[in-house]
Image (cartoon, rainbow, N blue to C red):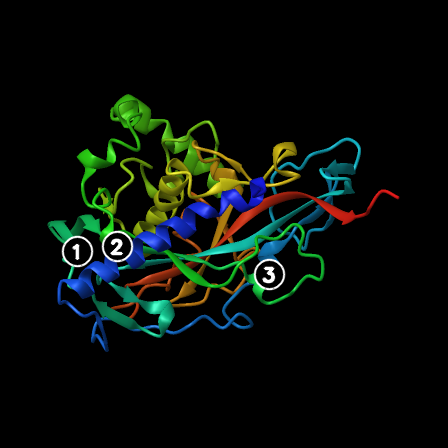
Amino acid sequence: MKSTRDRAFDAPRAVRAGVLAVLVAVLLAGFAPAAVAGTTCSGRFPNPITDICWSCIFPISIGGSAVLALDQEDTPNPGGNPLCGCPPLRVGIKTGFWEPARLVEVTRTPYCFMTLNGLELDLGIAAPRHHRSHSGDRATHSFYQVHWYMNPLLYWLEVLLDDACLERGDFDIAYITEVDPLWDDSELAFILNPDVALFANPAAQAVCAADCVAATAGFPRSELFWCAGCQGPMYPLTGHVGAHVGGVQASTLLVQRMTNKLHRELLMWAGTGEAGLCGFYPQVLMDKQNYKLQMVHPVPGTARIAGRCCQPFGRTTAVWGAGKEFPVKGEDFVYQVFRKRNCCATVPFSAP
């Protein structure tokens, strides 16, 4: 029988199986997919040494106290007795850290995979391209496609010897929005976020200013789940950005929406707090405080601003996003997502 941890990651495998089924259907229909060198698609595979800010995994905590912080931000950890136990017959110590778990592309060109060295696929399946509407000289609305990669860096790089607390797996494509009819249709997306009806009013959106302030000073407010901090409204869970300020702002908003969307679809599970010590658990209403992000492309965000190169969801891009967008090759974005993990770092033993 599969463990809870294994079941937590069956869903992304099902998504990959669905994508493969689409590819097979395309082949049978006579539209053989071919890789082409697109003039609007450029990128490269991230260098895990130079393009990833490894200080983002900190603080590392034991019990409720940080033992190695390196001036990084953190959320509360399970306190009390630092000892913990998990079945079957496993004992250990409560630990906390930020695991680099996912890589997210926000692209203007459908089927453009910047992380795969700018590979552009022609699957024969139409998907909407990036577009912007303008009011005067300002963009007011935009649309992007998003690609979601499994990227458990700590595991496949074998950074830590004890991997009991790490998500196991390899680098892999888990989700692409080009084949998701909900990503371009706000009415269909209502299936995933019917609660949007409660917050589609000026009063609810005005409260999001408090979320912006909180995220800029530290972490966003979990109770304001309909807000995406300074980036705008969390809903609808689509690729349409209703208030486009800039590429960095719009792309970070879509990273948050995509993460929230996958929580709603039970394709992302949480692993924080006491409930996460022994494995992952479903969290339909995403806790925004469990995530930080770091830009990988077009400009790797490894330079520290105020001692940090990772940003909690919702933090203003006015400071850290400056100079991160430029014409043509600098208008698509890739982010490494760090997920908060609380775990019972265990040593298995057998009863005599």
Badge 1 local density, few (<14 within 10 Å), some, or many (20+)?
Answer: some
Mark 3 or mark 1: which comes first in sequence? Answer: 1
- Residues marked 2 and 1 touching at CB (< 8 Å): yes
The secondary element bearing badge 3 is classed as helix
Badge 2 local density, few (<14 within 10 Å), some, or many (20+)?
Answer: many
For badge 3, the amino acid type reads Tyr
Residue 156, image quadrant: bottom right
Up/down of 122 relative to 9, above or below: below
Residue at figure coordinates x 75%, y 47% from the top left: 346
Q: Nearer the viewer, residue 217 or 94?
A: 94
Q: Which mark is residue 145?
A: 2
- The answer to whether residue 307 shows anywhere in this view is no
Up/down of 209 relative to 344, above or below: above
Q: Which residue is mark 3?
A: 155
The secondary element bearing badge 1 is classed as loop
Residue at figure coordinates x 36%, y 71% from the top left: 116
- Label 2 and label 1: CA atoms lie apart by 9 Å
Up/down of 171 relative to 85, above or below: below
Q: Quadrant of the image for the C terminus? A: top right
Mark 2 or mark 1: which comes first in sequence? Answer: 1
Q: Quadrant of the image for the N terminus? A: top right
Q: Position of residue 189 (x, y in %)?
A: 24, 36
